[in-house]
Amino acid sequence: MNGRIIHPRLGSAKNSGSTPLLRISSVLRMLLAMKTTKISFTAVAGLALSSMVTVAQAQQAVPANLATGFNAIREDTLRADLTFFASDALQGRMSLQTGDEVAIQWIASEFAKAGLKPAAKGSFLQPVELIEYRADREHCYVALRRGGSEQQWKYPDALGSYRSDVDVTADVVFAGFGITAPELHYDDYQGIDARGKIVLIFDHEPQETDPHSIFNGTGNTRYATGRVKILNAQEHGAVGVLIVAEPNRKHPSNQERVARIGGSETRAVPIPSQALAEDALHTPGAIISDAVAKQLFATAGVALSELQAEIDRDLKPQSRALPDTQVALHYRNASVSSGKTYNVVGLLEGSDPKLKAETILFSGHHDHNGISGTDIWHGADDNGSGTVGVVALAHAYAANAAHGEKPKRSLLFVVYAAEERGLLGSFYLAAHPLRPLETTRAVINFDMIGRNETESDQTKGLIEIPADTTNRLNLIGASYSPDYNRTVVEENRYVGLDLDYRFDRDYALNIFFRSDQFPFLLHNVPSFWWFTGFHPDYHHTTDTAERINYAKMAKILRLSYLTGYQFANEARPPKFIANPGAP
């Protein structure tokens, strides 16, 4: 699960020359390294078969035609796979590094063993070209030019980066929350000309503490995320974007939230940034502090807090040009390189001659935050649990199909690349779909499905956590498809999880757009993120396999198995609600 502040990044570059076949020598090195960590498939497979009683009890109520696949989802198999996947040998699975290449190869081999068809032009691997870069923070700045003088701000007051050097200077216009939503009769760009300008906008969206807001009450909408805002500014002709946290906010800013996570988010040598080599977004931006925004607004004759209050009051635009305010974005990188990673994709073709053209998509992401010195960010829950879950479901559906019960619609199993670097693999697949998005009927995305939710520094004071979460599953996206949710609730009678929708009402943690279901929501595909919640080990080296609640993880996968079958076979697939808060 992505916890970083995501910056606009894009560009084109030649690939590094790597081939679709992963380097065998690298794989061998990783497998040999397993000896030093005392991990082997044989040893892991001998772990206790504690799941059998649970399966036997639940099986009594499951329809007989689905029982084979249902019973194939076992705790001991999940434990064996995840113990390997989150081991020291895979070195934290950093995108573009050898450990993640081994992870990719393992997933592809499991899809092949399950009997899935390669879904990417005869391969299980969809190449994703990336640019990796490290910003030189000493030489990156945002500058205000006014009255013949210049004032510069660097990290942490101004946090911006781009995959190539940037020198942009332009006048500044304020554009409210940076949102254009014609169906809600709201447009921050009304009455201003952003062409050739740098746009200053608020983070999040209007009226976010109002449960009756047209912007989905207190829950985020698709308009709340920085990527969507920057794309909107780009469409209005802006050459740069400055984002500042709302002055009247009731939550930490994005910078403050990330700092609360600690772990890999604040390690001494920052993780390198990555960007898609092909992306629709090509406008640089920066996140600025309250103090910087106040200086930029000094000539406006009104405070930013007053303008936010006006917008929140009646949803009328307060956008305007800022007199005598010119800003320069100056970014430099210490290093830039290109590389190739892969989405891993396998297909179980449907049985119905017509409906097999439609798709139910199961997904997770395989990367995590790598290694630094002797510290390894194992990523067992984030997102070893989701990856192993997708693999388990591929085997379960294939086993059931072998016993004569094949779903009518086709099932696409995807494990994405580079989620931790900004949902890069899922944005790439959504832009380069292997099956048409208009006939993709539902997305079941797993990201962190292996733990009990407990209070952590990131969530303290921001969201209420139930006293007992040992049987609890958070579903994110229900307001966008009540039909989808009804099917989950109906199938849950066979499993008995506690279903929770708290995060659909969140406006502090940015949960709605922090995992790989989000790019598909932007394309009006019913998409839920299945999530067991945060814990103190999130993005820390202590996110290890022995801390996973395998009994709950197995129940979640059994519920998704039944839900997916229903999606694949029902006459009317779930509908998508584009604006759940609209009047």
Image (spheres, grey):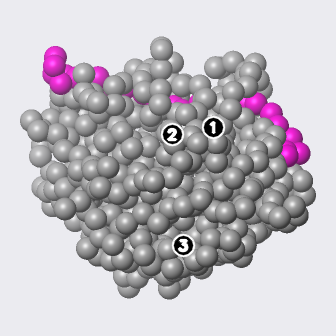
Front residue (pair 331, 103) = 331
Residue 211 visible, this orientation: yes
Left or right of residue 161: residue 464: left
Quarter placement of the C terminus: bottom left
Dots 2 and 1: beta carbons under 8 Å? no
Residue 359 visible, this orientation: no
Residue 164 in the image: state x and y as whole percent: 78, 38
Quarter placement of the N terminus: bottom right
Residue 173 in the image: state x and y as whole percent: 60, 57
Q: Amino acid at mark 3?
A: Glu
- Neighbourhood count class around disc 3 (C-alpha, 10 Å): few under 14, some 14–19, many 20 upward: many
Which residue is drawn at the image coordinates 31% and 42% (left, top)?
Answer: 524
- Which element type, helix, strand or loop, lies under badge 1? loop
Between circles 2 and 1, the one closer to the viewer is 2
Dots 1 and 3: beta carbons under 8 Å? no
Q: Which residue is mark 1?
A: 282
Left or right of residue 216: residue 43: right
Residues shaded magenta: 332-356
- Neighbourhood count class around disc 2 (C-alpha, 10 Å): few under 14, some 14–19, many 20 upward: few
Mark 3 or mark 2: name the one nearer the start of the chain.
2
Which residue is drawn at the image coordinates 36% and 39% (left, top)?
Answer: 523
Q: Which residue is mark 3?
A: 246
Residue 23 in the image: state x and y as whole percent: 73, 24
> Could you give the CA–CA distance between mark 1 and mark 3, rounded to whole angstroms?
24 Å
Q: Amino acid at mark 1?
A: His
Mark 1 or mark 3: name the one nearer the start of the chain.
3
- Which element type, helix, strand or loop, lies under badge 3? loop
